[in-house]
Image (cartoon, rainbow, N blue to C red):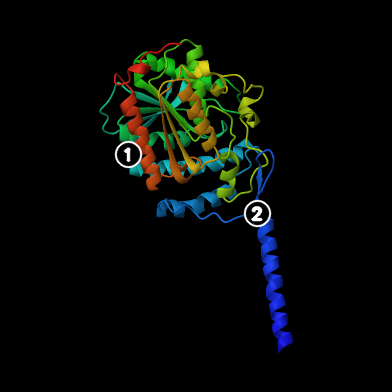
Amino acid sequence: MILRRLGIVLVVFAASLAANAYAEDARPVVAADGAVTSPGGRFPFSAFVSPEALARFQQVLADGRKSPDIFGPIAASRKFYGDMNDSRAERMRKLYPVDVKASKIGGVPVDVVSPLAQTDNKRILINLHGGGFLWGAGSGGLVESIPVANLAKIKVISVDYRQGPENTFPAASEDVEKVYRALLEHHRAQDIGIYGCSAGGVLTAEAVAWIASRKLPAPGAIGIFCAGLVDMDGDSAYVASLLMGDTVPASPMRLAMLPYFKGASVDDPLVMPGASAAVLAKFPPTLLISGTRDFAMSALLRSDELLTAAGVSTEVHVWEGMWHSFFSDPEMPESQAAYRVMANFFMRHLGDGNGAAQNRRP
C-alpha cells in the first residue's frame, strides 16, 4: 500500500513537472527586435459583436477557404468575386432601394446610383470599388454605393476604373480624374466627395494626390475604408490573419506585389501619398473606417496619425471584431452602423458647411 501511494505521488509529481515544463515552453518568446513567437493560444470571438456578425464570421472563413489565389488566373478571381458581389448587391437593393443606371462620364464606364427620393442635387459622391486593383467592377461598386446613396439621399457615381493585369498605374487615377473633371462642370468641388474600400480606399488617396498634381481643386471630403496612405504593415498585418483562422504571414502583402503597380515606386506620393507630408496637407476632411480583425487596421491608424500631423481633419471609426470590408454584408448591425457613419459624414462635410475644403487648390 505504501509503495502504491508512493507511486501515485511520483506520477502526480512527474505530471506536475511536465505541466510546468509545457507552460514554460508555451510562454511567448520576445526577441531583441521586439518580435514575439508563441506556440499558440486561444482567442475567443469578441463578446462585443452582434449575433448576426458571429453567424456571418463562419461563412466569411468558409468563403476565404474557397477563394482563388490572388495571383492565379484573373478570370477565376473575377468570376468568384463577381458572383459574390452580385449576391451582395441584390441583398443591398432589398434593404436600401435605389435606382441604378449604367452610363459613361468623361468616357469612363460608371454606374449611377440614385436614391428613389433624392433631396439633394448639389452634392454628389464618387465611389471607387475594392478588389485588389484586379476585380470588383460592376456589382462590387454597387455594394459600396447603394446603402450610402439611400441613406444620404445623394447620388453616387460608381466608377469602373481600369485595373491590372491589363493596365498599370496610373490608369485608375487617370480615370478618376476624367470623371472628376466632368463632374466639376456641373458641381462645385466642395460638393463632391470620393470614397472607397480596400483597393478603392488606396485609390481614393491616390486620386486626391493625383487631382492636386493636376492643379484641380480638392474634393469636399473623402472616405478611406479598410486601407491606408501607407503600405500594409504594423500589428494588424500579422495578428489579423491569426484572428481570421489563418497562419501568421512571414511578411504582409505589399502594394508593389499587385500587378497593377508593376514598375511603380512606393516612394512616389502619387502611389503612396503617406510618403509626403506636403501632399497630405492638401487632403480634405477624411473619414477612416476599419475593424479590429482587418489586416489593414494598423495602416489605417498610421494614416490617421500622418493626416493629423499634416493638419487634416480626420474622423476614425474602428468596429470591434470586424474583418476586412465587413460592411459588404448588409444584414449585420455593424454594417448598418457603418453605412450611417458614412452617410452622415458626407452630409456634414460636403457643401458650404465645410469652409476648410472649399475649392482648395494646391
Image spot of residue 85 (x, y percent): 48, 41
Image spot of residue 259 (x, y percent): 64, 29
| 3D distance between C-alphas at marks 1 and 2 | 53 Å
Q: Residue at x 30, y 31 (%)?
A: 153
Image spot of residue 158 (x, y percent): 43, 29
Query: Is residue 7 positioned above or below 32 on the image?
Result: below
Find residue 136 and name its label: none
Q: Residue 222 versus residue 276: which sits nearer the camera?
A: 276
Which mark sits nearer the N-terminus, 1 or 2? 2
Query: Is residue 275 positioned above or below 28 on the image?
Result: above
The type of residue carrying mark 1 is Pro
Q: Residue at x 71, y 89 (%)?
A: 1
Q: Residue 10 versus residue 279: which sits nearer the camera?
A: 10
Element carrying mark 1: loop
- Farthest-out residue, bottom: 1
Q: Residue at x 57, y 32 (%)?
A: 134
Q: From the viewer's perspective, is the residue at label 1 or at label 2 nearer?
A: 2
Q: Are marks 1 and 2 in contact (CB under 8 Å)?
A: no
The type of residue carrying mark 2 is Arg
Image spot of residue 88 (x, y percent): 44, 43
Structural crowding at the residue carrying mark 1, measured as other residues with C-alpha within 10 Å and reported as few (<14), some (14–19) or many (≥20): some
Mark 1 highlights which residue? 97
Asked whether residue 267 is in view, the answer is yes
Asked where in the image residue 193 lies, by quadrant, the reply is: top left
Q: Is residue 116 left or right of residue 109?
A: left
Q: Is residue 174 left or right of residue 95?
A: right
Element carrying mark 2: loop
Mark 2 highlights which residue? 27
Q: Residue at x 69, y 84 (%)?
A: 5
Q: Is residue 276 left or right of residue 22?
A: left
Structural crowding at the residue carrying mark 2, measured as other residues with C-alpha within 10 Å and reported as few (<14), some (14–19) or many (≥20): few
